[in-house]
Amino acid sequence: MLTYPATLLSDTNDTVLVTFPDFPEAATFGADEVDGLGRAVCALEEVIASRMADRSEIPQPSAVGQGQRGVRLSALTAAKVLLYQEMRAQGVRKAELARRLHWHMPQVDRLLDLNHASRLDQIEAALAALGKRLEVTLEAA
């Protein structure tokens, strides 16, 4: 769903440094490329969660360029990010979304919490309250 480009560079201490052009504040490392990419998902989720807490912009992924690797967010995390982006685009705050859905604020808070295993039907309901629909596709691995 959402795949962000990552740049991997060999570091001076025989590790691999992973950075993200779309998120300059995010960086992680690994013992090798596989380890670095494994840690990249967590680093990306942490910076996105931080931006959500600060009510900052979360950009759409830029294209994965030559020499870069794509880091794909999980489907649930991507759905939450898309919901957050749409709320920002429409100027809808959490309290307004809770009012539209007839939910309590903690329910909306959990819906936007990347560490909470929200149900997909709840995300779909929130998107519907914003006049949007979530589409899911299947691709070859």
Image (tube, helix red, strand yellow):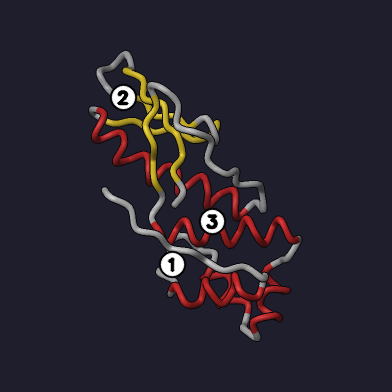
For marks 2 and 1, give the CA distance.
30 Å
Could you tell me how far apart the alpha carbons at marks 3 and 1 are, in whole angstroms?
Answer: 13 Å
Residue in front for this viewpoint, 96 or 131:
131
Q: Residue at x 74, y 61 (%)?
A: 90
Residue type pointed to by label 3: Val
* Quadrant position of residue 43: top left
Q: Earlier in the sequence, mark 3 or mark 1?
A: 3
Residue 131 drawn at (x, y percent): 67, 71
Residue 38 image point, x, y percent? 29, 41
Residue 92: image x %, image y %?
Answer: 73, 65
Q: Residue at x 65, y 59 (%)?
A: 86
The residue to which callout 2 is attached is 16
> Which amino acid, mark 2?
Val
Q: Which residue is mark 3?
A: 81
- Residue found at the very far top of the displayed protein: 12
Q: Which residue is mark 1?
A: 116
Mark with earlier residue (2, 3): 2
60 versus 64 height, above or below: below
Give the residue type that dot 1 points to.
Answer: His
**Most extreme residue toward the right, as rendered?**
91
Say few, some or many: other residues with alpha carbon within 10 Å of mark 1 (under 14 / 14 to 19 / 20 or more). Answer: few
Per the model, the C-alpha gap separating discs 2 and 3 is 27 Å
